[in-house]
Amino acid sequence: MSTDVNRLAVITWLAESASGLGRTALMKYCYFLQVVCGVPLGYRFSLYSYGPFDSDVLSDLDSAGSLGGVKSSVVYFSGGYGYRIEPGDRPDRVKRMGGTFIDAHQKELQWVVDEFKGWDASGLELASTLVYSDREAVRRGEQLGIGELSSRVRDLKPRFGIPQIQAYAEKLLSRDVLRSIR
């Protein structure tokens, strides 16, 4: 089966398993699956305004919607709007298309949902940016302290304070997610 079908199955599985899923959460869940858990989704994430991003995730979301795996609706809040992603009319059909892949990565899929369920978009943005910066340090062969990693993330995300960044870094470290911390 092609990676695209597998990705559509993953998105559909996430829509069923993570109630209250929005676009930011979907993006970050896919990022964590690929980067932290090693699930070969084939995305090419780059750092953007709200953390790691790949427009292919949104294209795959649209494709999963076209096949009936998911449905996406706009939700209005006092400060703006967001999206709610829910199972569509034919989620089982889409999941079956990538069933072998889903079965092979069930543990990782469940881990991501269990770890990050209930996190708001801001927390997911911060956590994924911490992981992104951490993996960049690993790629360069650097070992960092929490303070140094937090400073780097603060440079990228000045709206977050150092204490908040450090608290999230500690949380990720306690879950054995960060690799560059000495």
Image: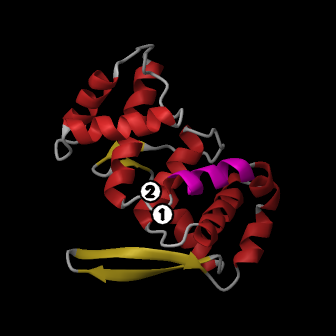
Residue 173 lies, with reference to residue 99, above or below; the image says above
Q: Position of residue 22 (x, y in %)?
A: 44, 68
Give the labeled residue for mark 1. 58
Furthest-right residue in this view: 100
Instruction: Give the side of residue 55 with respect to residue 114, left or right.
Output: left
> Which residue does the image show at 66% across and 55% down from the upper left?
110
Can I make out residue 43 in this image? Answer: no
Task: Find residue 119 and report its image quarter.
Answer: bottom left
Q: Most prominent secondary structure in the magenta stretch?
A: helix
Q: Secondary structure at mark 1?
A: helix
Q: Is residue 49 left or right of residue 178?
A: left
Q: Residue 86 in the image: x percent, y percent?
A: 55, 77
Residue 141 spot, x, y in % from top left: 45, 13
Quickly name the residue at label 2: 55
Query: Which amino acid, by three-letter code, is at mark 2?
Result: Ser
Q: Which residues are magenta?
A: 106-115
Locate residue 103 relative to residue 38 in the image: left or right: right
Q: Quadrant of the C terminus?
A: top left
Q: Quadrant of residue 114?
A: bottom right
Residue 58 seen in this snapshot: yes
Image position of 155 with respect to 64: above or below: above
Residue 23 position within the rendered picture, expressed as x and y whole percent measured from the top left = 43, 65
Mark 1 touches mark 2? (CB < 8 Å): yes
Tag of residue 75: none
Residue shown at 25% from the left, 42% from the top: 164
Which quarter of the picture shows residue 88?
bottom right
Disc 2, SS? helix
Distance Cα–Cα, label 1 vs label 2: 5 Å
Amino acid type indicated by mark 1:
Leu
**Quadrant where the N terminus is found in the figure:** bottom right
Colour treatment of the image: secondary structure
Is 1 part of what is drawn in magenta? no
